[in-house]
């Protein structure tokens, strides 16, 4: 047993029941490295974004804020008050509120377009993350299958009964992701109207 393992176990025993369990040495550095790598990757993607994407993101972020609501509340209230003759010295310039409705419609068209641009960018990022998750899961599945094979061989060598469990043979088979996708597609097609 290495010194770091002894230190880890000694630290783990001293923890109170309400404290989080101590991490083994090296775990924190791996976690921090992964977080830093993902943060750097996100920053690189943000830097690579086109000017148009950045503008759309800023507008979408602002239009989804309470400041946007307050600004519009003030503008519409002022517009209505002026056109109802409630503001002295300001003549009614839109007594039927047709211009206000037109501005609101045009603004809605542009805002929905900016939101769609931002959603498309977010969807592309989600697709990349999903692909990373899939690749990581496939790698993990392969590693677990290899570990199970090795563990069964060790258990068989030691004469442990559980090594001959027939369900383990099925678990030792590698998953073919394309076959899983084909099966999911078949299931979806059979359940669709």
Image (tube, rainbow, N blue to C red):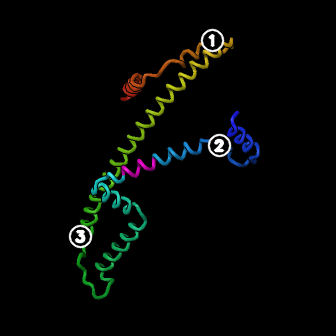
Residue lying at the far front of the rendered structure: 3
- Dot 3 lies on which element? helix
Which comes sooner in the sequence, label 3 or label 1?
Answer: 3
In the rendered structure, the answer to whether residue 26 lies left or right of residue 90 reads right
User: Dividing the image into 4 quarters, which one contains the N terminus?
Assistant: top right
Residue 190 can be seen in this image: no
Report the residue at 32% width, 75% height from top: 80
Q: Position of residue 38 (x, y in %)?
A: 45, 46
The residue where tag 2 is placed is 23
Q: Which residue is identified by label 3?
A: 99
Q: Tell me the residue that label 1 is attached to.
A: 164
Q: Nearer the viewer, mark 2 or mark 1?
A: 2
**Quick one: label 2, few (<14), some, or many (20+) residues within 10 Å?**
few
> How far is the residue under mark 3 from the one under mark 1?
80 Å
Sooner in the amino-acid sequence: mark 2 or mark 1: 2
> Does residue 170 appear in this view?
yes
Q: Which residues are magenta?
A: 38-45
Please name the predominant secondary structure of the magenta segment in the image.
helix
Quadrant of the image for the C terminus? Answer: top left
Q: Quadrant of residue 71?
A: bottom left
Q: Earlier in the sequence, mark 3 or mark 2?
A: 2
Q: Nearer the viewer, residue 133 or 95?
A: 133
Dot in front, 3 or 2: 2
């Amino acid at each position: 047993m290495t010194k770091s393992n002894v230190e880890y176990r000694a630290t783990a025993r001293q923890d109170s029941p309400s404290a989080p369990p101590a991490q083994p040495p090296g775990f924190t550095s791996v976690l921090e490295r992964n977080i830093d790598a993902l943060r750097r990757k996100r920053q690189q993607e943000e830097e690579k974004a086109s000017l148009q994407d950045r503008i759309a993101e800023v507008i979408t972020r602002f239009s989804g804020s309470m400041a946007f609501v307050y600004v519009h509340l003030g503008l519409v209230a002022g517009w209505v008050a002026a056109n109802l003759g409630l503001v002295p010295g300001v003549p009614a310039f839109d007594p039927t509120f047709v211009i206000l409705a037109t501005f609101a419609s045009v603004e809605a068209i542009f805002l929905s377009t900016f939101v769609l641009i931002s959603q498309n960018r977010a969807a592309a990022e989600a697709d990349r993350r999903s692909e990373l998750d899939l690749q990581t899961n496939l790698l993990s599945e392969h590693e677990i299958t290899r570990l199970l094979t090795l563990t069964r061989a060790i258990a068989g060598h030691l004469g442990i009964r559980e090594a001959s469990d027939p369900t383990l043979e099925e678990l030792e088979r590698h998953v073919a992701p394309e076959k899983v996708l084909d099966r999911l597609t078949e299931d979806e097609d059979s359940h669709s109207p």
